[in-house]
Amino acid sequence: MTQDELKALVGQAALQYVVPGEIVGVGTGSTVNKFIDALQSMKGNIKGAVSSSVASTERLKAIGVPVFDSNEVEEISVYIDCADEIDHRGFMIKGGGAALTREKIVAAQSKRFVCIADESKLVEVLGKFPVPVEVIPMATKRVMRQFAAMGGQAKLRMKDGSPLVTDNGQQILDVSGLAVRDPLAFENEVSQWPGVVTVGVFAHQKAAVCLLGTAAGVKTLSF
Ligand code: 5RP
C-alpha cells in the first residue's frame, strides 16, 4: 500500500470514534484531509466540528459540516488529528503543517485525542523530525540561541522566499538535532521561554489512541 492509501485507511477508521450527535475536534494535515473526506458519509449525524486551522475549516465547510469557534463549545469528546512523529507512549511531535497552536488548543478541550498516522510516524525517540515551535517574531533570534545552547539547530520556516506566517500571525522555528527523551520536561521548559507561543511537542496533550496504518491493516495502539 502507498503512504497515501495508508492515510486513507486510518482516516476512514477514525469514523468509529466520532460520537453521533456531538461536535468533533478536527486537526490539520494530509491524513486529516482523508478523515474529512470520510466524514462526509456521516455529516448528517454530527452537530459539527471545531477546527484547528483555516485550511481544515475551509475543507469542512466545503463538505457541509458546520464549524464552531472553540469559544462556543466547552468540552469536546473526541479530537482526531495526525502527527509528524508518535512514540510508544502516545507523545507526539506536531506542527509540520504550522497549525500546532490551534491543534494544542482543541486537543486541550477534548477528552480523548485519537491520532491517525501511517506507520512511518511511529518512533522510539521523538526528535528526528525537527520540532516546530511557534514564536512571536520579536523573540525569534533569542529563542534560536536558547535552542543552540541545548544542542539544537533552529531554522526559521520560510514560504515563497519570506518567513512563513501562521494562522495566528506568528513565525515557526524548526529545531533539528534534538532527542526528546523526556517529552513532558521538554514541553514544560520550552513553553515558558519568553516569546514561545507553542512548542510542537504534545506531551500534556498526548494521544489516548493511535490508529496506525500498516501494510497488514489498521493497528490500534492505546496509551
Ligand atoms: C499540522 C500537523 C500535522 O498533524 C502533521 O504535520 C502531520 O501531517 P500529515 O498527515 O500531512 O503527515 O501537526 O500542523
Image: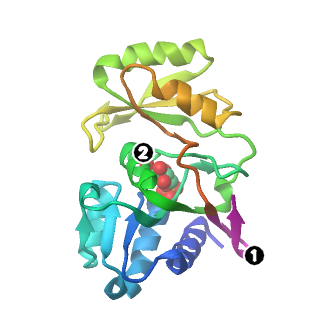
Which type of secondary structure does the marked residue at label 2 adopt? helix
Residue 115 horizontal/vertical position (percent): 56, 61
Prevailing secondary structure class for the magenta stretch in the rendered image: strand
Is residue 3 at all visible to an observer of this figure?
yes
Q: Residue 136: which quarter of the image?
A: top left
**Quadrant location of residue 62?**
bottom left
At label 2, the amino acid type is Leu
Mark 1 secondary-structure assignment: loop
Local crowd at mark 1 within 10 Å, few (<14), some, or many (≥20)? Answer: few
Q: Is mark 2 within 8 Å of ligand 1?
A: yes
Inspect the image, locate mark 1, and give the three-letter code of the amino acid beneath it.
Ala
Decide which of tag 2 and tag 1 comes sooner along the chain: 2
Question: What residue range appears in magenta?
Answer: 210-223
Tally of marks: 2
Of residues 87 and 46, the one drawn nearer to the viewer in this rendering: 46
On the image, the x and y values in percent for residue 137 come to 30, 23
Give me the C-alpha separation between circle 2 and circle 1: 30 Å
Mark 2 in CB contact with mark 1 (< 8 angstroms): no
Q: How is the image coloured?
A: rainbow
Report which residue position mark 2 lands on.
100
Residue underneath mark 1: 216
